[in-house]
Image: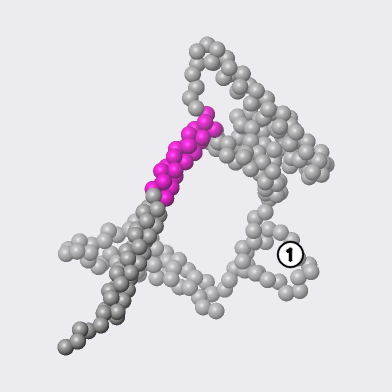
């Protein structure tokens, strides 16, 4: 097993690079970290550190494997999040606001009161956190908590869609104008691409037809030449020489 000492040679390689000339009297600029690395070079220890274990070891394992490989960080929410977005993939297409007020917004959320939380838009993460709270505090199973929270989520989503539709109808009633929605814009793009493909297919069909006509013309010309040669040959064969 070899050891990698490249980290200790970084400062020497960088110093030699700064001393070499680029063109004429020009030299490379010295990086800001070079003197620090020369004063405190990185070390390469000859023994592997045993990483922190985040889970209980397998008691059935007779010969442990990957002892020095860092273990995976697994959280209870990972499986819940995977199941929800597997059943609702289009929720990933909804825009989300990831900005926070002070970085401690989660302290103001109480998942015992439902999916609606102050300053947090309804999303799949709300379902995951609410389901986890029911499993840890109400003693529900994973499937029971998922079904309960899922129905709550559907009702709130339906309410949002109804409110949005009513707001659009009220705005149009007083003269509001809205452009094309996402479906109409996508259909326009699809129609435009179809017309481009139709024009390309027409050109390709015409090109293939021209090539076919040219090949037929060449074959006819070759057949005509062969016929002329056969006629000339037959004439010479049937012609007898005149007596002297």
Q: Secondary structure at mark 1?
A: loop
Residue 239 lies left or right of residue 123; in this view the side is left
Residue linked to disc 1? 57
Choose top left, top right, bottom left or bottom right for residue 240.
bottom left
Choose top left, top right, bottom left or bottom right for residue 48.
bottom right
Q: Nearer the viewer, residue 83 or 55?
A: 83
Please, what is the dominant secondary structure of the magenta stretch? helix
Q: Residues within 10 Å of mark 1 (few under 14, many from 20)?
A: few
Confirm whether residue 108 shows in the render: no
Q: From what the image shows, is residue 154 above or below residue 47? A: above
Choose top left, top right, bottom left or bottom right for residue 34.
bottom left
Q: Is residue 202 magenta?
A: yes
Residue at (48% x, 73% y) in the render: 4
Residue 15 lies left or right of residue 97; in this view the side is left
Q: How many marks?
A: 1
Q: From what the image shows, is residue 141 above or below residue 229? A: above
In the image, residue 55 lies at what x, y percent? 71, 59
In the rendered view of the protein, which quadrant contains the C terminus? bottom left
Q: From what the image shows, is residue 13 above or below residue 156? A: below
Confirm whether residue 68 shows in the render: yes
Q: Nearer the viewer, residue 84 or 25?
A: 84
Q: Which residues are magenta?
A: 181-205
């Amino acid at each position: 097993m070899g050891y990698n000492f490249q980290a200790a040679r970084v400062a020497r390689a960088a110093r030699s690079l700064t001393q070499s000339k680029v063109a004429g009297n020009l030299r490379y600029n010295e990086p800001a970290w070079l003197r620090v690395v020369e004063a405190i070079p990185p070390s390469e220890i000859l023994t592997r550190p045993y990483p922190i274990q985040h889970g209980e070891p397998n008691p059935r394992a007779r010969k442990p494997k990957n002892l020095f490989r860092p273990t995976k960080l697994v959280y209870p929410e990972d499986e819940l999040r995977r199941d929800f977005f597997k059943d609702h993939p289009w929720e990933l297409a909804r825009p989300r606001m990831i900005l926070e007020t002070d970085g401690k917004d989660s302290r103001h959320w109480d998942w015992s009161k439902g999916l609606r939380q102050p300053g947090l838009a309804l999303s799949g993460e709300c379902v995951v956190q609410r389901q986890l709270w029911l499993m840890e505090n109400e003693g529900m199973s994973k499937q029971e908590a998922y079904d309960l929270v899922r129905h709550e989520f559907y009702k709130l989503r339906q309410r949002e869609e109804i409110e949005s539709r009513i707001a659009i109808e009220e705005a149009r009633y007083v003269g509001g104008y809205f452009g094309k929605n996402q479906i109409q814009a996508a259909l326009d793009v699809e129609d435009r691409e179809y017309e481009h493909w139709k024009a390309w297919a027409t050109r390709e069909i015409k090109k293939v037809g021209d090539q076919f006509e040219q090949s037929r013309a060449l074959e006819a010309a070759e057949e005509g030449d062969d016929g002329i040669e056969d006629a000339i040959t037959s004439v010479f064969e049937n012609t007898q020489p005149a007596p002297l």
